[in-house]
Amino acid sequence: MIEIEVKARASHERVKELLRELGACVTGVEHHCDTYYNAPHRDFSITDEALRIRIVNGHAVLTYKGKKLDTVSKTREEFETGVDAAIMRNILLALGFVESGVVKKTRALFEFENFTICLDSVDGLGEFIEVETMVGPGSDVDHHRARVFGFLERLGIGEGDSIRVSYLEMLIGK
Amino acid sequence: MIEIEVKARASHERVKELLRELGACVTGVEHHCDTYYNAPHRDFSITDEALRIRIVNGHAVLTYKGKKLDTVSKTREEFETGVDAAIMRNILLALGFVESGVVKKTRALFEFENFTICLDSVDGLGEFIEVETMVGPGSDVDHHRARVFGFLERLGIGEGDSIRVSYLEMLIGK
């Protein structure tokens, strides 16, 4: 699957009001503790990949994200499987992967049409919105990305507000 | 955990009779389809590590095995977590790992004292026995390995019969 994702800084108070007016449904609140790993054979901060173990409300998932496929959004290939967090960490360390950082956040989730809207409060960074849609291989990515930007405009967020830097990069760069 | 494991060729008909006489319990039959992967940054056939996705009776597990810790048995560090097989495969390939081979076998499992006895019928290789015991870090590995060899003697298998070559290596070497 291809994840089309756009992120921007946003005051949650204001955005929540607009989401309510649109009729978007709240679907949950998640507490994320994300540990990122870098590879021994290539530097993910250069190749623009990500490998992460996320613990979300007590469950663990391993996620790989490929390099971004365009210059304006965070569209990229993504693979995700449930794992045992402690054991997966041991496997990665034994293979020579190294921990590159930890991102902790609270994510309020909303659904609207086929978008997932995440209102993220990130420890040490502040408030953000992420709008995501997943599309199958061979889909018209440009069309779906335009739809995501169109939706963000309704929340008062323009294409120029899009941030492609990851939370991890923001935290490391601080 | 440390896996202490000894493997040897064995006629299953003869061993099953001895296991029955000892009172070992049959605990199950598993069908394994094991896909092994090699790393992009080091050659596991040289470092003596193994990374595998096993599909066993429809469930998938990712296993990492470290290099062997002695010269007579297959004692080594082992980490294992449940995964989604197809997605984990995609993650490994995206990270640059490559498939090194597939081993298919039927394994009849027996328990006796704290040993797991595996009678393996391996496609293309024939019949084998593996006796395993798992011990915590800091345990007396020599003592536990000697107990495994002592048990194998009761099945008519001597220390000199121990095979340290993996099924994968046997298949590749054929």
Image (cartoon, coloured by chain):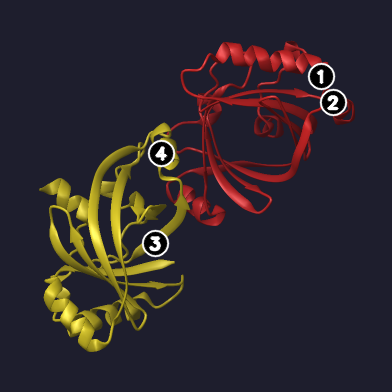
Chain colours: A red, B yellow
* Residue A63 to residue A45: above or below: below
What is the number of the mark on residue B77?
Answer: 3
Whether pointer 3 and pointer 1 mark residues with C-beta atoms closer than 8 Å, the reply is no
Q: Say which residue label 1 marks.
A: A155
Q: Nearer the viewer, residue B173 or A145?
A: A145
Q: Of the residues tagged 2 and 4, which is closer to the observer?
A: 2
Tell me the kind of residue under disc 3. Glu
- Count of numbered circles on the image: 4
Q: Secondary structure at mark 3?
A: strand
Tell me the kind of residue under disc 4. Leu
Gap between marks 3 and 4 measured at Cα: 20 Å
Q: Residues within 10 Å of mark 3 (few under 14, many from 20)?
A: many
Q: Quadrant of residue A130?
A: top right
Q: Quadrant of residue A48?
A: top right
On whether disc 2 and disc 4 are found on a single subunit, the reply is no
What is the number of the mark on residue A15?
Answer: 2
Q: Secondary structure at mark 2?
A: helix
* Residue B169 to residue A105: above or below: below
On whether disc 3 and disc 2 are found on a single subunit, the reply is no
Place of residue A129 in the rendered image (x, y in percent of width and height, measured from the top left): 76, 27
Q: What's the residue at 16%, 49% (across, down)?
A: B171
Q: Residues within 10 Å of mark 2 (few under 14, many from 20)?
A: some
Tell me the kind of residue under disc 1. Leu
Tell me the kind of residue under disc 2. Val
On whether disc 2 and disc 1 are found on a single subunit, the reply is yes
Gap between marks 2 and 4 measured at Cα: 38 Å
